[in-house]
């Protein structure tokens, strides 16, 4: 598959230390920014051209926000940072002995990047727990492509139902099954009911979109279990009020083009017909992390994450930091804040070394700033330390948190405008998708 000469791409002047950051997500972006005043040459390598704001993917999938509102070109983000070069390429190898990263271009040819310091923040992908065959029937929710696939499937399902006379067949198209009742599954479930009962409620002539069923499956006994019992039961109540059917304490054991099969606590299997199944149940490290772990001779856990030293370096490699979702440290969750703080910590350590400050490596200390989940219009849950908010107050907090982390003034302003417009009138105008099947 690899063709052409392996070429070395210079990372800058010979005198300055070279930092390669793999991944321009939350971890990589914050690491790069933290190095803007450090006397180093930085290469930010990503297999995508844009930084993606994953927490709002579900709003893109359900036609509320556009792709452009939740992503920002990495080049635009970094164009003022003179010591940083952005390169498009997928990392395929690391050689710690020669200190080089190998990356593939879009045409399959490769290039290599020398480094003195390496920060790896390549994130996770959807996990089907060993059942990769489910993926073609039940898209996950990790990439922009996933969001657009889900958008196509949701709106196409209503279009299909509008043309089908057989009630049983039509009901299958009007049933949406979601596996995983964490924030992403809950947010999607709420949005699908919102769009069925508000956005498109009066747009069809044969079907009544308000009859759309949304089924939510999870092995835990309540949705959003990581938010604690009180908020979790509020979420359950709100979801039921919205019309979401909760199937908690179940395990999805099979998925095909016509629906899914789930077993309950007693192991009894039940078949649920649903022409749209969405998978948000689990994550695992992207494939490159295995290559990295082998090259560094370090262990991976069950989900592919690498256990790191207290300063976030890889065991045995004091010039390689592993951060964000792919690091395992004290059971920290895979959330944006862990990645951002990890990126700043790794970059801060490099800065200190460049400044010649020869203290012991600093231990990474995570400050938990809380978590939030959107359930429906004017209803979100927020947990910050002992503070637990829900309903409209929670929704206001949720909006402020998300706006503060969206990249760029343009995206913030346009997201606020879209939300206000959508909230007052229930409208969703980002409903275009390439129609592959006609
Ligand atoms: C749908 C969804 C909703 C979420 N909601 C929330 C939320 O509300 N709050 C919250 O705190 N967290 C949320 N998260 C989690 C949060 O997005 C992640 O914790 C965070 O993105 C992790 O940052 P990261 O830098 O480790 O990885 P990512 O942000 O995933 O970035 C990884 C980057 O690496 C690139 N990459 C991958 N492989 C390669 C390769 N081989 N070569 C080059 N580049 C590569 C990718 O293109 C990507 O740009 C959500 C995640 C999802 C999927």
Image (tube, rainbow, N blue to C red):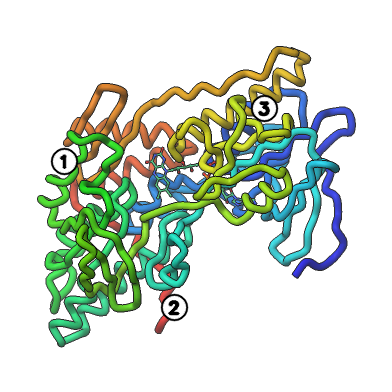
Residue name at image x 45 percent, y 33 percent: 332
In front: label 2 or label 1: 1
Q: Nearer the viewer, residue 357 or 228?
A: 228
Q: Which residue is most to the left?
A: 241
Residue to which mark 2 is pinned: 436
Whether residue 88 is visible to the viewer of this picture, yes or no, is: no
Residue to which mark 1 is pinned: 233
Label for residue 430?
none
The residues bearing labels 1 and 3 have C-alpha atoms spaced at a distance of: 45 Å
Q: Residues within 10 Å of mark 2 (few under 14, many from 20)?
A: few
Residue to which mark 3 is pinned: 36
Note whether 7 is above or below 107 in the view shown.
above
Mark sitting earlier along the chain (2/3): 3
Q: Secondary structure at mark 3?
A: loop
Tell me the quadrant of the picture where the C terminus can be found: bottom left
Question: In this rendering, would 374 be left or right of 202?
Answer: right
Which quadrant of the view contains residue 118?
top right
Tell me the quadrant of the picture where the N terminus can be found: bottom right
Question: In this rendering, would 176 be left or right of 42?
Answer: left
In front: label 1 or label 3: 1
Q: Secondary structure at mark 1?
A: helix
Q: Secondary structure at mark 2?
A: loop
Note whether 433 is above or below 197 in the view shown.
below
């Amino acid at each position: 598959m690899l063709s052409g000469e392996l070429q070395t791409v210079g990372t800058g002047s010979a005198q300055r230390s070279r930092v390669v950051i793999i991944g321009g997500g939350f971890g990589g972006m914050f690491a790069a920014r933290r190095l803007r005043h450090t006397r180093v040459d930085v290469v930010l390598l990503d297999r995508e051209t844009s930084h993606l704001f994953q927490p709002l993917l579900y709003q893109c999938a359900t036609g509320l926000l556009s792709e452009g509102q939740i992503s920002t070109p990495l080049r635009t983000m970094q164009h003022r940072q003179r010591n940083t070069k952005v390169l498009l390429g997928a990392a395929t190898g690391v050689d710690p002995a020669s200190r080089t990263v190998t990356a593939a271009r879009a045409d399959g040819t490769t290039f290599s990047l020398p480094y003195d310091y390496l920060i790896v923040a390549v994130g996770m992908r959807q996990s089907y727990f060993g059942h990769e065959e489910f993926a073609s029937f039940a898209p996950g929710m990790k990439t922009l492509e996933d969001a657009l696939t889900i958008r196509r499937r949701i709106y196409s399902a209503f279009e299909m139902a509008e043309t089908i006379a057989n009630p049983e067949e039509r009901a299958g198209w009007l049933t949406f099954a979601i596996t995983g009742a964490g924030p992403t599954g809950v947010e999607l479930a709420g949005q699908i009911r919102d769009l069925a009962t508000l956005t498109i409620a009066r747009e069809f002539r044969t079907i009544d979109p308000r009859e759309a069923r949304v089924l939510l499956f999870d092995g835990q006994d309540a949705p959003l279990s990581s938010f604690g019992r009180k908020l979790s039961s509020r979420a359950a109540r709100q979801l039921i009020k919205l019309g979401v059917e909760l199937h908690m304490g179940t395990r999805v054991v099979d998925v095909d083009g016509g629906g899914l099969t789930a077993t309950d606590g007693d192991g009894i299997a039940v078949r649920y017909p649903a022409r749209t199944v969405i998978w948000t149940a689990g994550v695992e490290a992207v494939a490159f992390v295995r290559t990295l772990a082998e090259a560094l001779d370090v262990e991976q856990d069950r989900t592919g994450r690498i256990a790191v030293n207290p300063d976030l370096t890889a065991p045995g490699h004091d010039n390689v930091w592993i951060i964000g979702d792919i690091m395992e440290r004290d059971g920290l969750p895979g959330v944006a804040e862990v990645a951002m703080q990890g990126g700043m910590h790794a970059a801060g350590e490099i800065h200190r070394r460049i400044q010649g400050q020869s203290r012991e490596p600093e231990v990474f200390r995570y400050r938990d700033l809380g978590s939030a989940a959107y359930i429906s219009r004017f209803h979100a849950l927020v947990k910050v330390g002992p503070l637990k908010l829900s309903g409209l107050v929670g929704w206001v907090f949720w909006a402020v948190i998300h706006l503060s982390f969206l990249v760029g003034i343009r995206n913030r302003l346009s997201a606020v405008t879209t939300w206000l417009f959508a909230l007052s009138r229930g409208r969703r105008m980002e409903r275009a998708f390439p129609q592959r099947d006609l």
